[in-house]
Image: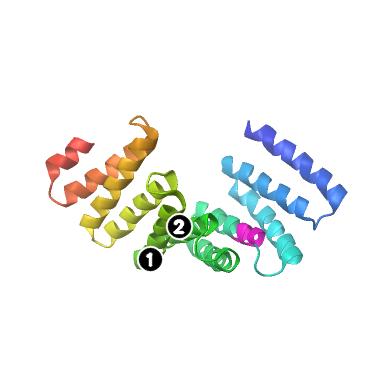
Amino acid sequence: DYDEAEQRLRDALRIRRALFGDTSAEVANTISALVETLWEKGEYAQAEPLIREALQIRRALYGGNHADVARSLEDLGTNYFQQGKYEEAVAFLREAVAMRREVHGTIHPALAQAMGNLAWALFSLGRADEAEPLTRLSLSMNRQLYGDNHPETATSLNNLGYVVEAQGDLAEAEAAYREALAVNRKLLGEAHPKIAVNLSNLAFVEYALGRRSEGIDLL
């Protein structure tokens, strides 16, 4: 029950403010947990001032480059993205990616996720050319971190399919969608919503390639 979870987190936040002060790491961490619960309820407007407060606390505590500061930047970017404010999302997600690179180096799960999020925000703005290299980097990182048969790799493959399809490269889109489908079948079986999405994506590409019967068979 998300309403109950929200109330408990608000109670915990009040207690931690009293115990540790308004500008403590404990308060910032509790705010982040509360934000995730508000997201589950779709309450992005309520989440925004809390995210900004956590970001302000973490910048004061840790200075410029820190994983927790990057997390708050990503949270703010994600919050804007979910409200359809893609330009604002891109600005904060771009800053988060730069910070993740400084903090974690060139290969890290948090960097791969941040790059994927930035790429998707750019894609949502119709900027597939900018999204493509980030999507490829995220995919490459996920392969190195998790291997070929992993949910993160499947997600990156599917996203690459979207990006290159938008650029008109239907052959590569087909290959990406097929691999994403194969990975998800191994991990999830046939009766899963992600399989339906993969099949639909692949069907539309087959249809666009002129292979209508193959496309219809996939639907």
Return the residue nearer the eye: 42 or 202: 202
30 lies left or right of 156:
right
Percent across and percent down for residue 117 are: 48, 57
Mark 2 residue element? helix
The image quarter in which residue 71 lies: bottom right
Majority secondary structure of magenta residues: helix
53 lies left or right of 167:
right
Percent across and percent down for residue 141 are: 44, 58
Amino acid under label 1?
A: Pro
Q: Which residue is mark 1?
A: 133
Q: Quadrant of the C terminus?
A: top left
143 lies left or right of 204:
right
Amino acid under label 2?
A: Gly
Q: Which residue is drawn at the image coordinates 30% and 41% (left, top)? A: 182
Magenta stretch: give its range. 67-73
Question: Residue 116's mark?
Answer: 2
Q: Which residue is drawn at the image coordinates 52% and 61% (left, top)? A: 89
* Colour scheme in use: rainbow
